[in-house]
Image (cartoon, rainbow, N blue to C red):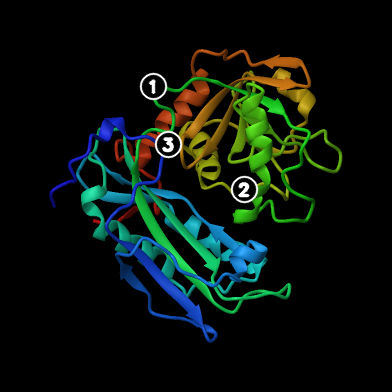
Amino acid sequence: MEKKNIDWGSLGFAYTETDYRYSSLYKDGKWDEGGLITEPSVTMSECAGVLQYSQSCFEGLKAYTTEDGHIVTFRPDLNDARMHETCERLEIPTLPEGRFIEAVEEVVKANEAWVPPFGSGATLYIRPFIYANGPVIGVAPATEYEFRVIVMPVGPYFKGGVKPLTLRVSDFDRAAPRGTGHVKAGLNYAMSLHAIMDAHRKGFDENVYLDPASRTKIEETGGANIIFVTKDGTLVTPRSDSILKSVTRRSICYVAEHILGMKVEHREVYLDEVADFAEMGLCGTAAVISPVGKVVDHGKEICLPSGMTDMGPVTKKLYETLTGIQMGRLPAPEGWIHVIK
């Protein structure tokens, strides 16, 4: 199929309307068969549950063109499982078994002309989401929903190369204990918007959130999990019931332990430990790994030895290995690469 006439190298990380999207409706206690549509707009009741009580969830993954010309996605089964868990937590009806991956496949195939070529630095971002479109005024789950999958070509998350970030320790809490921090609910991100804009206005790239109970332990940022590397080369990831189960973070841990032979620890990480680490990074679908050069704790600067000019050597090796697997340059563990075409 002939590709769209796009300057792939100039793409940013932003919404672009593509030709097809997938839609399935839930009504009268069941999901319909679903299918591809071309209409990008949504019409709903002014009293829709998503407008009144923010009943929605979403996922994010990417499709890639590999070196041998295949179009693939990376571990979509984990996104499927996480959306299922989120739906259960938000009283949203779960999708029929197999529907999530089927929908992703259909939309990517239908929009093949929008999938960036190998070597362009661009990918096809996939955004599956479910929202309550049925009317509800009492505080209760809606009775009607839409599951929709949209796609768009995106460039590298960081244009012009990766530069280490400066984070601040936030006075806001990201999630309540035993709340919804562990699922991918839209409301979690709405709650983080003021905090991230406040950070930007004060010259910081992101917030580091602490556990709300003791405010001594690292949790995550507004949109990414956190990883650390010790001076002896051990990968450490914070443990908390409020941290989102990042597909990228779990993959990094596997790569570190089983491919690079590193020691991996998933444990509570205290704020006063940060100064002792050699490297720090944020991980997620959009950027894979973003290096952190500095954390500012209420005026006190904690500078990572890896510095403010480039990724640390271990973080860089993790990044290169994981992206190499995703793009087909390196062999993948069984089940990680889902071939669409």
Answer yes or no: do the residues labelled 3 and 1 have beta carbons within 8 Å? no
Q: Nearer the viewer, mark 3 or mark 1?
A: 1
Q: How far apart are the two marked residues, 2 and 1, measured between alpha carbons? A: 27 Å
Q: Which label number is shown at residue 322?
A: 3
Q: Is residue 107 visible?
A: yes
Query: Percent x, y for residue 330?
Result: 33, 37
**Mark closer to the chain start, 2 or 1:** 1
In the displayed structure, would residue 203 be above or below residue 103? above
Vertical arrangement, residue 293 with respect to residue 68, above or below = above
Relative image position of residue 269 (x, y in whole percent): 74, 33
> Element type at marker 1?
loop
Amino acid on which disc 2 is placed: Tyr
Q: Tell me the crowding category of disc 1: few under 14, some 14 to 19, or many 20 or more residues within 10 angstroms, Cα based.
A: few
In depth, the one of 225 and 267 nearer the eye is: 225
Res. 55 in view? no
Q: Please name the residue that numbered disc 2 is placed on.
A: 189
Q: Secondary structure at mark 3?
A: helix
Q: Nearer the viewer, mark 3 or mark 2?
A: 2
Identify residue type, mark 3: Leu
Residue at 76% x, 36% y: name it. 210
- The first of marks 3 and 2 along the sequence is 2
Instruction: Determine which residue is flagged by label 1.
Output: 160
Establish if 32 lies above or below 264.
below
Name the quadrant of the C terminus.
bottom left
